Image: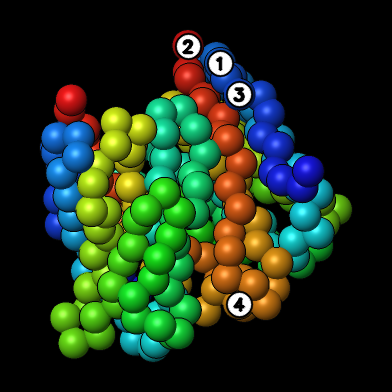
């Protein structure tokens, strides 16, 4: 079955450490997105990519980095510059010409 | 600029009674509108979408929503709540989803269903 796979499901980060969240899709979707979810805040856009080797900052990109070397993959790195990284992170994708976004099941990141 | 406002952060209903989750939007263009549902620690599932066709949109699990341009609203309804409907619901707007532009999310409404 096609879908989006996010891993790991739970991730713990020490202070000052960089961590990378994985997002892989086998839907042949063109565009991919990273959102951050905090209680009562809805989802806020971190980065998005509409084609391979290109990506744009969203509303809250500071302290995060991404790459899009393959169409199927859009990893998110949470750097030590992100001062409050504890949150639920969701990856999504869409095929150009479609209206339906597909979401992964999320990664919960906690700073310890 | 696009924006979406969910008018209630929390709605509580009894099982078998109607559900109404309210959403107002702001958009410079003819928007596409969506409702997503999220169960605890899960990803988001699309309930329904409006993309300039029929103004009354039917979705999964008995939910439906009506696009009212004059009121800039897209309220979500269900005639009879079920315990399994308890979740968080997001109203979402996008000016150009076909072009791959990002979705704009409301802050969510938590639906509680009591027996």
A86 or B57, which is in the foreground?
B57
Q: Nearer the viewer, mark 4 or mark 2?
A: 4
Q: Identify the residue under disc 4.
A: B98
Per the image, the residue denoted by label 3 is A9
* Residue at 30% over, 77% down: B67
Label 1 to label 3: alpha-carbon separation = 10 Å
- Marks 3 and 2 belong to one chain: yes
User: Which residue lies under the disc numbered 2?
Assistant: A112
Label 2 sits on a secondary structure element that is: loop
| Residue A3 drawn at (x, y percent) | 72, 45
Residues packed near mark 1 inside 10 Å, few (<14), some (14 to 19) or many (20 plus): few
| Marks 3 and 4 close (CB-CB < 8 Å) | no
- In this rendering, the answer to whether B69 lies above or below B109 is below
What residue would you read off at disc 1? A12
C-alpha span from label 2 to label 1: 6 Å
* Chain ID at mark 2: A
Q: Tell me the subunit letter for badge 3.
A: A
């Amino acid at each position: 079955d096609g879908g989006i796979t996010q891993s790991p499901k739970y991730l713990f980060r020490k202070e000052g450490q960089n961590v990378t969240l994985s997002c892989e899709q086998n839907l042949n979707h063109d565009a991919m997105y990273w959102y951050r979810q905090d209680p009562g805040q809805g989802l806020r856009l971190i980065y998005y990519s509409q084609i391979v080797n290109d990506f744009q900052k969203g509303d809250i990109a500071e302290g995060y980095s991404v790459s899009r070397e393959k169409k199927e993959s859009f990893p998110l790195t949470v750097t030590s510059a992100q001062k409050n990284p504890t949150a639920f992170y969701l990856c999504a994708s869409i095929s150009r010409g479609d209206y339906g976004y597909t979401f992964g099941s999320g990664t919960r990141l906690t700073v310890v | 600029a696009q924006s979406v406002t969910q008018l209630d952060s929390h709605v509580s209903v009894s099982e078998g009674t109607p559900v109404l989750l309210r959403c107002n939007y702001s958009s410079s263009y003819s928007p596409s509108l969506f409702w997503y549902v999220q169960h605890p620690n899960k990803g988001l599932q699309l309930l329904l979408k409006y993309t300039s066709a029929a103004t009354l949109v039917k979705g999964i699990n008995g939910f439906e929503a009506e696009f009212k341009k004059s009121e800039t609203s897209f309220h979500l309804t269900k005639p009879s709540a079920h315990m399994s409907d308890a979740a968080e619901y997001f109203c979402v707007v996008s000016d150009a989803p076909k072009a791959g532009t990002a979705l704009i999310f409301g802050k969510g409404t938590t639906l509680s269903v009591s027996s």
